[in-house]
Image (cartoon, grey):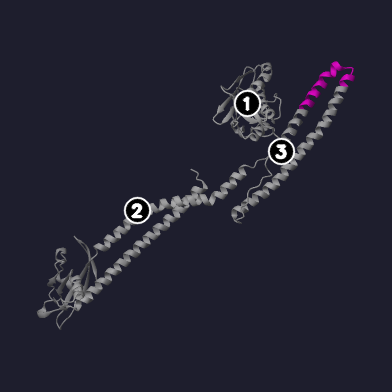
Amino acid sequence: MTFTLRSRLTLLYTALFGTLLAVIGAVSYRVLAYQLDTDVSANLTELTSGLHGYLRFPNGMPAVVFDQTDPAQAAFVEEATRYYQVFDVRTGDLLVQSDALRPLGLEFTDDEVRQFREHPMALDLDTDYGRIRLSNSVLTPAAGQAYLLQVGVLLAPVDAALKRFLILLVMMVPAGLIVTFLIGRWLAGVALRPLVELADASRAIDIGELRRRLPIRGARDELDDVAAAFNDTLARLEQAVGEMRQFSTAMAHELRTPLTALRGDIEMAMRQSGAIAEIGPRFASQLEEIDKLKRLIDQVLTLARAEAGEIRLAPDAIDLGQLTASLVDQLEPVAQAKGVRLRFEPATAPVVVLGDPNWLERLALNLVDNAIKFTPAGGTISVRVSRDGEMARLVVQDSGIGIQPELMPRVFERFFRADPARSSGVEGVGLGLSLAKWIVDRHHGRITVDSRPGTGSTFTVLLPLESH
């Protein structure tokens, strides 16, 4: 599958932004988890160290002593003692345990208590009510006394916050990719619009419009450099084509004079020759070849003038059906002489186009004459005129020799002949269809061909209807 440049740019933007969004999301999640963990640890350290100042051990039993009339102390002690317990390190006995901590089942053996004394560090434990973080600190209120204080903080709020953040990331990343895709496609369209305009302008330049140039926006960017380079190429091409046209025109003019003189000399020799019966056929053959050369020169000269813009059209409202019908009537004897059946299928309603009647007649003449030349005896040629929406359709279909598929793109080239070996006996040098295409182009239409070897060819011309 081939993607357009706009699609490739959009996919590239989306992929880059998606990768960036995923990296930012992962880093944000890690930073948030670290920050929340740090805050919990700091809060736990604060609660533990603060509770040290309120613990007393009368008669070897822990008791929390504080000023109950002080709201700040009461609030702090209530929070610090929500999840706490005290062990006697010497015996491993649990001396006191808060009501909130009791359901969690956090009771440790003597060995574990002694291990906590040796390595008093915080630890995270999983319970039926979620994770909890316990701090371990040793208190020695008097000689020979040692107590292990554990203060806990539930990690469920932290886990819930991280889970919500992760869900938010999972939801926002696809949404962000969709928004990025839409915005990226729009931005790619905006960025490529000047390039599309340059492409449209370049398509409008053909061999007959080499004087035209691509617009330069004055932005002094890469697109202006491309347009300037293309315009320089057009200038060189215009000069080269102009020189070729001048050469063709001059050559045609120069050849017409000696051919006319040569024909006159042959005709004079035929009148003066005494052995006319013997050399007459030779002179006649030479005259026929000279006439062919003159027709070729006239066609080359006409096409050169047409492509050089020296021929002006005289547009008028023309009924394409009547024009084609009249032409078919004129060519029917030619087709009958070759043994080819020529028929015309008129439209059910007038098909009026705005065009030059002489050139439109030349267009139909070239197509029908081409069909007659390449259709063997016993074949059929069908000419149809009809409406196709806002266009007039002219179809010339024959049952002739057809065209090889690999040669189809070259049908409208100058001097192109589909199969010289098979059409060696056919008059013409391959200029009729190139002139037909020029006529269609000048009338803002389209011409196409559909052909199969041994089956025949179908030429279709579409011309704009006259707008009332």
Query: Which is nearer the eye, 294 or 187?
Result: 187
**SS of the residue under disc 2:** helix
Q: How far, Cα to Cα, is label 3 from label 2? A: 64 Å
Residue type at mark 3 is Gly
Q: Is residue 319 above or below residue 165?
A: above
Q: Which tag is nearer the camera, tag 1 or tag 2? A: 1
Q: Is residue 374 visible?
A: no
Which residue range is magenta in the image? Answer: 269-292
Q: Given the current orientation, which residue lies at the most extreme left position?
A: 59
* Residue 309, numbered label: 3
Of the two numbered discs 1 and 2 on the same chain, state the one appearing first in sequence.
2
| Circle 1 residue | 320
Q: Which residue is more in the foreground, 31 or 406? A: 31
Three-letter code, disc 2: Met
- Within the image, what quadrant is residue 282 found in? top right
Q: Compute the Cα span from label 1 to label 2.
A: 64 Å
Q: Residue 140: x and y, percent? A: 17, 80
Residue 131, position as x, y percentages in the image: 23, 63
The answer to whether marks 1 and 2 mark residues whose Cβ atoms lie closer than 8 Å is no
Asked whether 23 falls inside the magenta stretch, the response is no
Give whichever of discs 3 and 2 has the lower sequence position.
2
- Which x, y percent locates residue 134? 22, 69
Q: Is residue 444 left or right of residue 121?
A: right
Q: CA distance from mark 1 to mark 3?
A: 25 Å
Residue found at the far front of this picture: 468
Mark 3 near mark 2, Cβ–Cβ under 8 Å?
no
Q: Quadrant of residue 42?
A: bottom left
Residue drawn at 50 percent across, 51 percent down: 188
Q: Nearer the viewer, mark 1 or mark 3?
A: 1
Residue 171's disc number: 2
Look at the image and tell me whether residue 402 can be seen: yes
Residue 246: where, in percent of width, then height? Answer: 76, 40
